[in-house]
Image (spheres, rainbow, N blue to C red):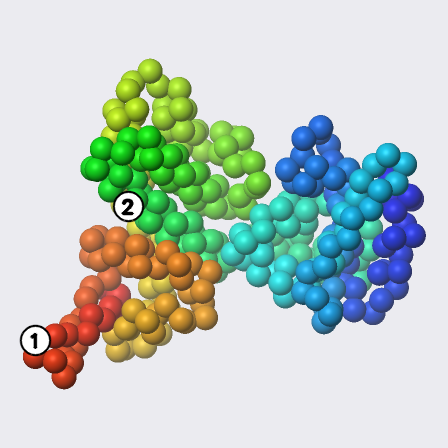
Amino acid sequence: MEDLLRPIYQERASNSNTHGILLIEKNKPISPVTDNFDVILLVIVSDPNQAWFVKHYEFEGKTAAMHIVDHELLKSWIDTSTYRRSVEWIINGKIIFDRNEYVEKLKNELSTFPQEKRQLKQAIEFAKLTRSFSEARDLFDSGQFLDAFSKVLRSLHYLGRLAIIEKGYHPEVIVWSQVKRIDRETYKLYEELIQSDEAIDKRVQLMLLAVEFALSSRAETCSQHLIEIMNTKEEPWGYGELKVHPAVQSYAFDLSSMVEYLLEKNIIKVVPVETKGNSIFHRKYKANN
């Protein structure tokens, strides 16, 4: 396979802005990791004309996709789980070109999973979980049990990803087989929701309690990324100010539900600030250290 594709990637390897090239082969009939292509070529570059460019090929009855990705964009994908396939490509891909051991160092960094990057990923998944849980609870209270079931299932998905990150691993594209290997307790919740003979409303009610417990027990750990940002200044933060902070951008859409949950758990607090209006206050936030 590599020999057949050499004419395609050799030109890229000769470019001075190419850091490395990995080859990922399809290893089963249906392969979400490779988008069902027989092979993926990941070309990591700097200063490209496009941050992410893709070409598709056919050869001898097989298919290939070449992804040419700016190294800064790739790091962003890794740090924020924006494009989860990229993590698996780097971890499991075969290095076929590596300038100054760039790809080898990237593989090593992924295997060690530094604490600061783990904190960011925990905050992202936790923020999504707080929103999904809140929506599931509201749907359940409204008697919309099928929709609540769907939201609870999504909540368990975020919880499963959190459990994987806590154990020091990067979540894969296929999450539940990974959760089954790494965290049996979370996997059992998934089995109970899917396989139980109870009525749907009873299953949802039970899972809401389980997810609430899981959220509560993880709140302090998973909010550390946000708390450290809030502690960078003495003054309380306006919500709009916090929402546009560069370090929060990867979970800005779910920030409000995360903030409300952390208020509920007394991890952060409200600081009222007077406005020009009579008896109207700005609602600002501060870590409850």
| Mark 1 closeness class: few <14, some 14–19, many ≥20 residues within 10 Å | few
| Mark 2 closeness class: few <14, some 14–19, many ≥20 residues within 10 Å | some
Identified by mark 2, the residue type is Ser
Which residue occupies 48% across, 46% down? 165
Q: Secondary structure at mark 2?
A: helix
Which residue occupies 54% across, 57% down? 79
Q: Is residue 57 visible?
A: yes
Picture coordinates of residue 198, whole percent (x, y): 29, 18
Q: Residue furthest top?
A: 197
Which residue occupies 17% across, 77% down? 273
Q: Is residue 55 above or below residue 159?
A: below
Q: Is 200 or 157 nearer to us in this picture?
A: 200
Quadrant location, the N terminus: top right
Picture coordinates of residue 17, whole percent (x, y): 79, 69
Numbered tag placed on residue 127 in the rendering: none
Picture coordinates of residue 40, whole percent (x, y): 75, 45
In the image: residue 59, left or right of residue 152: right
In the image: residue 123, left or right of residue 148: right
For disc 2, the marked residue is 134
In the image: residue 128, left or right of residue 67: left
Q: Secondary structure at mark 1?
A: loop
Q: Are marks 1 and 2 in contact (CB under 8 Å)?
A: no
Which residue occupies 33% across, 30% down? 146
Quadrant location, the C terminus: bottom left
Identified by mark 1, the residue type is Ser
Q: Is residue 68 above or below residue 236?
A: above
Q: Earlier in the sequence, mark 1 or mark 2?
A: 2
For disc 1, the marked residue is 279
Q: Is 249 or 138 nearer to us in this picture?
A: 138
Q: Is residue 117 above or below residue 216?
A: below
Q: Is 101 or 199 nearer to us in this picture?
A: 199
Exactly how many numbered labels are in the figure? 2
